Image (cartoon, rainbow, N blue to C red):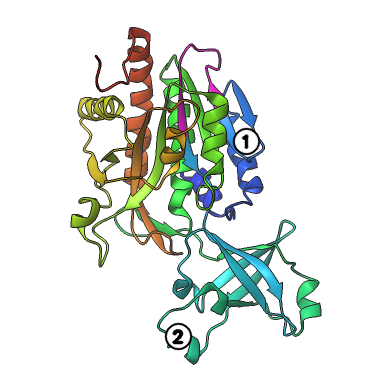
C-alpha cells in the first residue's frame, strides 16, 4: 500500500466540481498498471486493466470533497461563500482555510465573533473568509468569484495506526480503487477492471453515471466511507456496529446485489478476514446508487471504510482498514474473474 500516494492525494484540493488537479495525479498513478486510460466530460479518470476482456467490473471511488465556492467579495475584502456538498457551517467557524485561485493557494481563515458562536444555527451565509485584504479591490487582485475554499488541515498520524485529515471521504475510497486494481492485475485477474476515480458525488452524482453508462460493466463495486459507531455520540442502533480497525464494511440493503455480497463474504472468509456490516434501509448515499440506475441497471455492491467524524475537517481513519479493503477487493476481483467465466448469475431469483 502506497501511503505516500494517499497523503499526496489528501494534500491536493478537489472541491466538488473542481477535481482536475487531483485527477491528473490519479491518471499518473494508474498509468503504472493500466493497459489503457480514459476520461470523459464529467472529469472522471478511469484506469483500465484487460480492456478487451469479455466481462468487466467497475470500481468507483469518488475523488471530490466537500467545501465552498466564493460567491462575492465585499468592500472590506472578505469573501462570501456557497456550499459545495454537505458541509456543517458551525464546524468551520474560526478555522484556517485554503482559497484556490488559478492553481495557486491563498491562505485565509473563517471569521469568528462572539455573536456568531452564540447563534443556535449557523448558516453558510453567516461565514466569511478573511485573507488579510484591506479592501475589495485588494482581495480581488488575489482571488476571484468562483474560486474554491477548503479546510486547511494536513495529514497527522495518530495512535494505533490511525490518522486524521480533511477529505478522507472519499479520497481513501478512490485510493483503494486504484490500489485494488493494481493488486488484482498483479495477481492475474483476467476480467476487465475499470478503476474509476469519480467526480461530483458530493453534489450531483454525475461522475458515477457517466462512468457506468459509458463503460457498461457487468457489475460495480462502490468504495466509500461509512460512519464508525465508536465515535462519540454515534449509535450502533442506527445502521450497525462499525469500529475503526474492525475491517472492511459490507452493506446489506435494497440497493445491494445479493449474489455479489455473498461472494464478497465468501472471499473474506477464505482470507480469514473479519468484515463488518452496515444496513441501508433505502439508498446507500454513495456512487453505488447512481450506478444501479445507469444503462439497463447495473448490479452493485458496496465496500466501505470506517470513518469517524465524517464531513468535518478532522476525519479519522485506520491504515489497517484501508489495507484490508485493498486486500479483500483484489482477491474478490480475481475470484470474480473465475466465476464470470463459469457464468456467474447476478439474479437472486429465477423462474
Q: What element carries label 2?
A: helix
The relative height of residue 279 versus residue 189 in the rendered view (above or below) is below
Which is more toward the observer, 148 or 206? 206
Question: What segment is highlighted magenta in the picture?
Answer: 47-59
Which is more toward the observer, 119 or 91? 119
Residue 291 in view here: yes
State how far apart marks 1 and 2 are (Cα).
Answer: 44 Å
The relative height of residue 322 versus residue 16 in the rendered view (above or below) is above
Q: Viewed as shown, does residue 344 lie left or right of 349?
A: right
Which quadrant of the figure has residue 198?
top right
Dot 2, how many residues are within 10 Å of its Cα: few (below 14), some (14-19), or many (20+)?
few
The relative height of residue 36 versus residue 103 in the rendered view (above or below) is above
On residue 117, the disc is 2
Tell me where residue 177 appears, x and y as whole percent.
46, 35
Q: Is mark 1 on a helix, strand or loop?
A: helix
The magenta stretch spans residue 53: yes
In the image as oriented, which residue stretches furthest toward the top?
Answer: 342
Dot 1, how many residues are within 10 Å of its Cα: few (below 14), some (14-19), or many (20+)?
few
Tell me where residue 297 appears, x and y as whole percent.
43, 28
On residue 28, the disc is 1
Amino acid at each position: 500500500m502506497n501511503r505516500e500516494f494517499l497523503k499526496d492525494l489528501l494534500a491536493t484540493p478537489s472541491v466538488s466540481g473542481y477535481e482536475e488537479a487531483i485527477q491528473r495525479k490519479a491518471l499518473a498513478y494508474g498509468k503504472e498498471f493500466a493497459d489503457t486510460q480514459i476520461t470523459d466530460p464529467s472529469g472522471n479518470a478511469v484506469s483500465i486493466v484487460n480492456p478487451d476482456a469479455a466481462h468487466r467490473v467497475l470500481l468507483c471511488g469518488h475523488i471530490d470533497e466537500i467545501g465552498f465556492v466564493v460567491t462575492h467579495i465585499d468592500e472590506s475584502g472578505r469573501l462570501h461563500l456557497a456550499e459545495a456538498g454537505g458541509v456543517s457551517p458551525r464546524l468551520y467557524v474560526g478555522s484556517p482555510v485554503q482559497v484556490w485561485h488559478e492553481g495557486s493557494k491563498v491562505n485565509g481563515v473563517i471569521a469568528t465573533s462572539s455573536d456568531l458562536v452564540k447563534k443556535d444555527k449557523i448558516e453558510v451565509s453567516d461565514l466569511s473568509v478573511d485573507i488579510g485584504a484591506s479592501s475589495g479591490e485588494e482581495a480581488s487582485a488575489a482571488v476571484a468569484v468562483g474560486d474554491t475554499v477548503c479546510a486547511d488541515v494536513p495529514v497527522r498520524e495518530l495512535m494505533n495506526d490511525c490518522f486524521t485529515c480533511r477529505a478522507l471521504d472519499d479520497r481513501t475510497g478512490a485510493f483503494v480503487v486504484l490500489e485494488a486494481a493494481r493488486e488484482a492485475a498483479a495477481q492475474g485477474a483476467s476480467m476487465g477492471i475499470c478503476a474509476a476515480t469519480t467526480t461530483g458525488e458530493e453534489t450531483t452524482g454525475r461522475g458515477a453515471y457517466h462512468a457506468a453508462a459509458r463503460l457498461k460493466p457487468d457489475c460495480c463495486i462502490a468504495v466509500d466511507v461509512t460512519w464508525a459507531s465508536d465515535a462519540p455520540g454515534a449509535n450502533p442502533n442506527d445502521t450497525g456496529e462499525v469500529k475503526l480497525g474492525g475491517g472492511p464494511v459490507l452493506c446489506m440493503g435494497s440497493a445491494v446485489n445479493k449474489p455479489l455480497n455473498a461472494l464478497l463474504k465468501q472471499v473474506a472468509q477464505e482470507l480469514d478476514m473479519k468484515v463488518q456490516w452496515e444496513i441501508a434501509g433505502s439508498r446507500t448515499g454513495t456512487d453505488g446508487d447512481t450506478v444501479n440506475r445507469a444503462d439497463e441497471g447495473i448490479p452493485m455492491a458496496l465496500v466501505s471504510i470506517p470513518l469517524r467524524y465524517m464531513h468535518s475537517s478532522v476525519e479519522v481513519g485506520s491504515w489497517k482498514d484501508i489495507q484490508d479493503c485493498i486486500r479483500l477487493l483484489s482477491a474478490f476481483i480475481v475470484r470474480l474473474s473465475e466465476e464470470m467465466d463459469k457464468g456467474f448469475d447476478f439474479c437472486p431469483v429465477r423462474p
